[in-house]
């Protein structure tokens, strides 16, 4: 049974622990960046069918990171909404350079 979390604040350290491998995180950042590029392109071109690429890019890169580098199941499978929010919080912290010093539940950086 999946662990239950009372809030995103409680979930986020778990999320970071599930993303401790640098390659896994990097693949998340690539996928998230490509999602943003596609969303901007859709708004500019009005080619709405490109929205079909959003989940493929966003989850495709992330899942490769989990299955081949992190060797765990993506948090999306158990906690889809918190996981989606976690992706974007981690991505923002990466760009703000505030992620590096964060410690996860296990004490890893």
Image: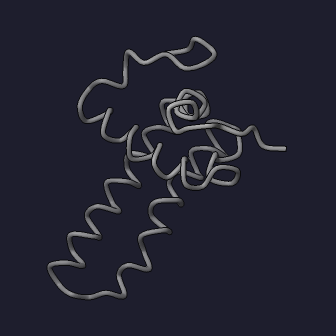
Q: Position of residue 40 (x, y in %)?
A: 21, 69
Q: Nearer the viewer, residue 12 or 4?
A: 4
Q: Nearer the viewer, residue 91 or 80?
A: 80
Q: Can you name the residue that lies furthest to the top here?
A: 107
Q: Can you name the residue that lies furthest to the front here?
A: 6
Q: Residue at x 37, y 88 (%)?
A: 49
Identify the image quadrant of residue 100. top left
Horizontal side of 95 relative to 19 (left or right) equals left
Q: Position of residue 31 (x, y in %)?
A: 41, 55
Q: Residue at x 35, y 41 (%)?
A: 91
Q: Can you name the residue that lies furthest to the left here?
A: 44
Horizontal side of 48 relative to 5 (left or right) equals left
Horizontal side of 95 relative to 14 (left or right) equals left
- When the figure is inspected, residue 90 is found, relative to residue 52, above or below; the finding is above
Q: Nearer the viewer, residue 91 or 82?
A: 82
Q: Position of residue 45 (x, y in %)?
A: 17, 84
Horizontal side of 42 relative to 80 (left or right) equals left
Q: Nearer the viewer, residue 68 or 41?
A: 41
State how the image is colored. one colour
> How many discs appear?
0
Q: Residue at x 62, y 37 (%)?
A: 6
Identify the image quadrant of residue 51. bottom left
Q: Residue at x 55, y 14 (%)?
A: 108
- When the figure is inspected, residue 5 is found, relative to residue 33, above or below; the finding is above
Q: Position of residue 68 (x, y in %)?
A: 65, 44
Q: Quadrant of the N terminus?
A: top right
């Amino acid at each position: 049974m999946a662990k239950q979390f009372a809030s995103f604040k409680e979930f986020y350290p778990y999320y970071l622990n599930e993303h401790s491998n640098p390659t896994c995180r990097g693949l998340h950042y690539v996928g998230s960046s490509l999602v943003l590029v596609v969303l901007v392109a859709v708004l500019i071109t009005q080619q709405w069918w490109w929205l079909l690429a959003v989940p493929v890019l966003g989850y495709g890169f992330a899942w490769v990171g989990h299955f081949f580098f992190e060797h765990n199941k993506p948090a999306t499978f158990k906690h889809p909404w918190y996981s989606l929010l976690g992706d974007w919080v981690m991505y923002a912290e990466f760009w703000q350079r505030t992620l590096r010093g964060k410690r996860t539940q296990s004490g890893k950086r």
